[in-house]
């Protein structure tokens, strides 16, 4: 019997390329596009941030979803839902238009109403389904921003038979961000009369924790790699949620993210000057020359180029780079192209490094998708020494682009990169275990030595380029899991 198509509502704070600060955006977009292509009815809601470039969007009139209101605590919020097709796909996106909350310079703020912005998103996603008479089989929430949906479905909207069969799934992309607020917001959460439903130890400390609430109530928990799913059961990685996650271990599954091969494919990437693939790899060298010329780096004598594209936060292991690279750059020949922004101490470090080694280091502070693609295509080596990494996408982009990843064995990095063994010729990158300076130094020395061994280097590149981390495989794992919990609920 043919399997029935699923009805899925996905609510997220980010969606590539419209609203993105990191991999959450890439994953929500690519997974939704995959589900849509496979024939599932997927309805995605994101806020209509004023930072979204709407020039390529054609909003369709949607009279039933205009002039709506939601009461959140003492706030009577007026909103409407617009819809438009995500460019270059057939996926229809729903936008939560509420200027009072989303007409701000960035996606996230540190303002006093940050909780309200995402309570609104969560409730509007549910009420959008009601307005459309859409009974989702699966409500897919992502990170703390929409983690209250499972609680709301089980309490505030439990009266609505529309959601009678709905199962909620919470995907944890990064447990370091939990959405912790002062318990004064209980009224806004709609929980003043239901405090017993929340985590009592937090309340005793005058806190509420959105992600933890999602972990308590979601029917199914997923995270973005099998290794991270194990790691977050331990105090080192669980960031305080490990005990609760252990209690829910039977409902926690790790699925590695995929690569959106429509966007990240060196064969037809519109953002890089020369196209190539594993069979015709000469274009890679040309991309390197073009990139180094653009960044004004000295490319003579086949100097290896190391690329970094990253949010500059403690998660990404920048402190190891700080400790190792200034010395190593004096001892060994390599150039460095860095793209990223974040904590001032790390931005300052890369600015100073660039200042000291003008023709060997280029640091671009900011966000540039084009430069991210050019660095993936033009670098020889990609550095990602993360302290923790739920999945990580750039190492998988690197593999596709024939750029050798140097990573620490944690989370999705451990699941996607295998240490190269020069004897057997097996493996796809350089992987080190410990989060310390010696380990990174070993990793960098090893990769720089290998670079000189042209035969082995070619083998290493090809091994990486042959890997398939596309959404065709990973997306199917989500569908299987969704079907499984729906079958179990019968
Ligand atoms: P995280 O979500 O923790 O930031 P991921 O590796 O999962 O890490 O995803 C990061 C995504 O954001 C990748 O698509 C990467 O190319 C992109 N990215 C990060 N920093 C920048 C930047 N400064 N400019 C452009 N893209 C960036
Ligand atoms: C998070 C994680 C990253 C992951 C991304 C998408 O931001 O830090 O490792 O790849 O989400 O799931």
Image (cartoon, helix red, strand yellow):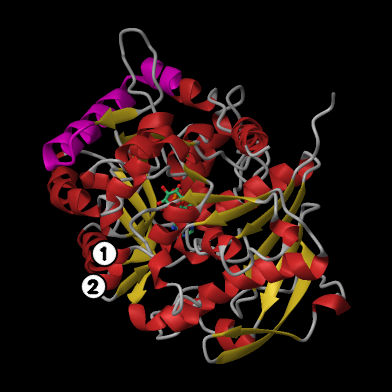
**In-image side of 17 versus 231 (left or right):** right
Position of the N terminus, as image quadrant, is: top right
What residue is shown at x 30% (from left), y 60% (from top)?
A: 313
Q: Magenta region's main secondary structure? A: helix
Residue 68: x, y in percent? Answer: 74, 83
User: Viewer-proximal residue, 247 or 276?
Assistant: 247
Compared to residue 199, the image places residue 7 above or below, namely above
Say whether marks 2 and 1 touch (CB < 8 Å): yes
Circle 1 sits in a helix, a strand or a loop, which is it? helix
Categorize mark 1 by other alpha carbons within 10 Å: few (<14), some (14-19), many (20+).
few
Q: Which residues make up the magenta segment?
A: 433-460
Q: Nearer the viewer, residue 154 or 251?
A: 154
Q: Which residue is mark 2?
A: 205
Is residue 32 inside the magenta stretch? Answer: no
Q: Position of residue 18 (x, y in %)?
A: 63, 65
For label 1, the residue is 201
Label drawn at residue 127: none
Say whether residue 191 is left or right of residue 141.
left
């Amino acid at each position: 019997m043919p399997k029935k198509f699923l009805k899925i509502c996905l609510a997220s704070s980010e969606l590539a390329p419209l609203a993105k600060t990191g991999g959450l955006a890439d994953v929500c977009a690519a997974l939704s596009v995959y589900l849509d292509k496979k024939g599932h009815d997927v309805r995605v809601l994101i806020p209509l941030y004023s930072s979204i470039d709407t020039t390529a969007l054609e909003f369709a009139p949607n009279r039933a979803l205009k002039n709506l209101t939601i009461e959140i605590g003492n706030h009577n919020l007026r909103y409407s839902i617009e819809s438009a097709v995500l460019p270059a796909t057939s996926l229809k996106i729903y936008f939560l238009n509420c200027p009072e909350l989303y007409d701000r310079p960035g996606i996230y703020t540190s303002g006093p109403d940050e909780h309200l912005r995402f309570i609104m998103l969560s409730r509007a996603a549910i009420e959008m389904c009601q307005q459309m008479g859409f009974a989702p089989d699966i409500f897919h929430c992502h990170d703390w921003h929409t983690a209250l949906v499972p609680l709301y479905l089980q309490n505030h909207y439990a009266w609505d038979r529309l959601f009678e069969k709905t199962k909620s799934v919470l995907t944890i992309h990064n447990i370091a961000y939990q959405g912790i607020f002062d318990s004064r917001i209980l009224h806004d959460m709609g929980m003043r009369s239901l405090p017993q439903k929340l985590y009592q130890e937090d309340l005793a400390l005058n806190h509420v924790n959105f992600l933890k609430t999602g972990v308590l109530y979601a029917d199914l928990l997923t995270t973005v790699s099998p290794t991270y799913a194990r790691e977050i059961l331990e105090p080192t990685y669980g960031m305080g949620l490990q005990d609760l996650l252990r209690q829910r271990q039977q409902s926690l599954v790790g699925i590695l993210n995929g690569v959106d091969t429509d966007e990240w494919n060196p064969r037809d990437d519109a953002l890089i000057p020369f196209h190539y693939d594993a069979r015709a790899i000469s274009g890679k060298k040309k991309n390197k020359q073009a990139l180094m010329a653009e960044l004004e780096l000295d490319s003579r004598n086949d100097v290896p180029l190391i690329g970094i594209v990253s949010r500059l936060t403690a998660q990404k292991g920048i402190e190891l780079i700080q400790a190792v690279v200034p010395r190593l750059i004096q001892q060994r020949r390599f150039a460095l192209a860095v793209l990223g922004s974040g904590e001032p101490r790390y931005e300052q470090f890369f600015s100073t490094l660039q200042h000291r080694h003008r023709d060997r280091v280029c640091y671009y502070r900011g966000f540039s998708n084009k430069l991210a693609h050019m660095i993936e295509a033009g670098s020889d080596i990609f550095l990602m020494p993360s302290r923790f990494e739920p999945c990580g996408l750039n190492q998988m982009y690197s593999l596709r682009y024939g750029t050798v990843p140097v990573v620490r064995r944690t989370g999705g990095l451990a699941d996607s990169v295998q240490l190269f063994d020069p004897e057997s010729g097996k493996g796809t990158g350089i992987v080190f275990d410990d989060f310390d300076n010696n380990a990174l130094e070993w990793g960098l020395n090893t990769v720089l030595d290998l670079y000189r061994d042209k035969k082995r280097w070619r083998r290493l590149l090809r091994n990486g380029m042959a890997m398939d981390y596309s959404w065709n495989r990973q997306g199917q794992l989500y569908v299987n899991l969704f079907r499984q919990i729906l079958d179990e609920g019968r």
